[in-house]
Image (cartoon, rainbow, N blue to C red):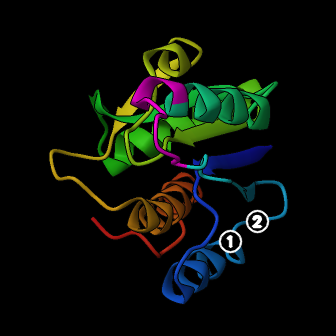
Amino acid sequence: MRLVLAAIGQKMPAWVEQGVAEYRKRFPRHLEFEIKALPLPSRQSGQTVERLQQKETVALLKASDGCYRIALDERGKQWSTKDLAKRLEDWQMQGDDIAFLIGGPDGLSSECIRHCQQQWSLGLLTFPHPLVRVVLAEQLYRAWTITTNHPYHRD
């Protein structure tokens, strides 16, 4: 099973690359964590937010084709880490690849969200997109450790 993070934005600071790499190497072989970093559409004058989001939507849907899609969106439901662990167990039983979608600076379009099976909010705070990559990698790893009784997570 693959956990795919499909995100708009390719040039991440070194701390983001290092943070994500640290958690990626901890995942077991049967649970691959993959990042598909997609280019930010050119923000030329005359481009509307809707047009930019449409381009991002096409790229995100293509990158997550065949996956069960989860939109990371502030209007989504909030999950605790234990909720995420339970969902991870369920996803593993279903056997589908899971894609987490992160839009560009203007967020995900309503069209993109309609193509997702779930919406997830990481909380009431607004996070910069690079930080979300690290938080998501850590939380997915933590969720996996809960499902396997690994000592990483403590109650």
Residue 47 is covered by the magenta coloring: yes
Q: CA distance from mark 1 to mark 2?
A: 9 Å
Of the pair 115 and 107, the residue shown nearer to us: 107
Q: Look at 45% across and 67% down and name the residue there.
A: 130
Magenta-highlighted stretch: main secondary structure? loop
Look at the numbered disc 2 and give the secondary structure of its residue.
Answer: loop
Q: Quadrant of residue 116?
A: top right
Image point 45% across, 24% down: which residue?
50
Q: Is residue 9 visible?
A: yes
The magenta stretch spans residue 144: no
Residue projecting furthest to the left: 124
Give neighbour class at mark 2: few <14, some 14-19, many 20+ (Cα, 10 Å). few
Residue closest to the eye, 36 or 106 = 106
Q: Name the image quarter holding residue 49.
A: top left
Task: Identify which residue is drawn at 56% across, 39% down.
Answer: 101
Residue that badge 1 annotates: 24
Crowd rating for badge 1 (residues with CA inside 10 Å; few <14, some 14–19, many 20+): some
Q: Residue 92: in sight, yes or no?
A: no
Q: Which residues are magenta?
A: 43-51
Vertically, is 16 above or below 114? below
Question: What amino acid type should be assigned to the residue bearing mark 2?
Answer: Pro
Task: Give how far across and how far down residue 102 sits, in percent.
Answer: 50, 44
**Please, what is the three-letter code of the amino acid marked with disc 1?**
Arg
- Give how far across and how far down residue 40 sits, in percent: 59, 51
Q: Which mark is residue 28?
A: 2
